[in-house]
Image: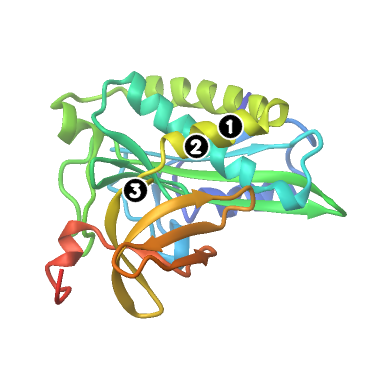
Amino acid sequence: MEVKYYKVIDSTNDEAARLLDGGLVEQNSSFVVRADYQTDGRGQRGNVWRSNNAENLMFSYVFFPKKVLASDQFFILQAAALSVADYLKSRGLPDVKIKWPNDIYCGMRKTCGMLIENAVSGRFIKHCIVGIGLNINQKVFPESLPNPVSMSLLTKKNYNLDEEFETLCKILEQKLTDAEKNPNELHKKYLENLLGLEKTLIYRANGVFFKGIIKNVDNRGLLTVENAESGETGVYDFKEIELVVPEQQKNTIGF
């Protein structure tokens, strides 16, 4: 697999899109854009992804599904999330879970964020850009981030970024291939690794804080959460609900 490496770039996802749009890469052949530092890294919900220079993994994995319907694109997200979760477990990280939809947590601390962007042609996905930011060796994080953690902070080890990159890409490649073959098994494993499934945690939706219990995530990625006090359930799309982590709860009255 071709790897396009940059010491500094604005965003690996943006560069991947430019390469695709400009016809500068072989069509239908997976490739990776990797950088030591991003000046304009992007995360979910329009957030900025901040990372110290050459301390973490920041890359965008581009692949071309054989025949995945646009309506089934949540399978891509599940495969990417499970790839990182499996990788972290293989490295002995504790209590690895997927925070819906695709952040990766160790306990209640964020280790990895993703931004997945799909291009659609007709009814099918043309290509996927899977942007991954994984905290590896960084020890100090901005105070504005509520709950970051790195592999190094958790294990007290320093890692060779090139070796970790190669290992993670192999897992990601295999998982994305398998996702097309057995989507039902993929979805089952995603639920098994979901943070908050059948557990009471604090959420915020429509500006209201409440104790909620995740009951399900359907094949489109919609989240079903039960209010632990009223028993009522709500179904939420991306950006409509958020988990309130312990560091944020300090400013939440009543919890």
Instruction: Give the amino acid at mark 3.
Output: Gly
Q: Where does the image place residue 44, in percent across and percent down from the top left?
A: 46, 59
Q: How is the image coloured?
A: rainbow
Q: Quadrant of the C terminus?
A: bottom left
Please tell me the numbered disc located at residue 196.
3
Instruction: Give the amino acid at mark 2.
Output: Tyr
Distance of mark 2 from mark 3, alpha carbons? 12 Å
Q: Are marks 1 and 2 in contact (CB under 8 Å)?
A: yes
* Residue at mark 1: 186
**Residue at horizontal 74 percent and vertical 37 percent from the top:** 64
Name which of mark 3 and mark 1 comes first in the sequence.
1
**Residue at horizontal 20 percent and vertical 31 percent from the top:** 152
Nearer to us in this view, 117 or 41: 117
Total number of numbered labels?
A: 3
| SS category of the residue bearing label 2 | helix
Name which of mark 2 and mark 3 comes first in the sequence.
2
Q: Where does the image place residue 86, in percent across and percent down from the top left?
A: 42, 26
Specify whether residue 162 is in view: yes
Q: Are marks 3 and 1 in contact (CB under 8 Å)?
A: no
**Labels 3, 1: front one:** 3
Relative height, residue 110 to residue 91 (above, below): below
| SS category of the residue bearing label 3 | loop
Seen in the image, is 36 located left or right of residue 173? left
Q: Tag 3: Cα neighbours inside 10 Å, few (<14), some, or many (≥20)?
A: many
Q: Where does the image place residue 247, in percent across and percent down from the top left?
A: 16, 60
* Residue at mark 2: 190
Nearer to us in this view, 133 or 199: 199
**Residue at horizontal 87 percent and vertical 54 percent from the top:** 122
Q: Tag 1: Cα neighbours inside 10 Å, few (<14), some, or many (≥20)?
A: many
| SS category of the residue bearing label 1 | helix
Q: Where does the image place residue 72, in percent across and percent down from the top left?
A: 71, 47
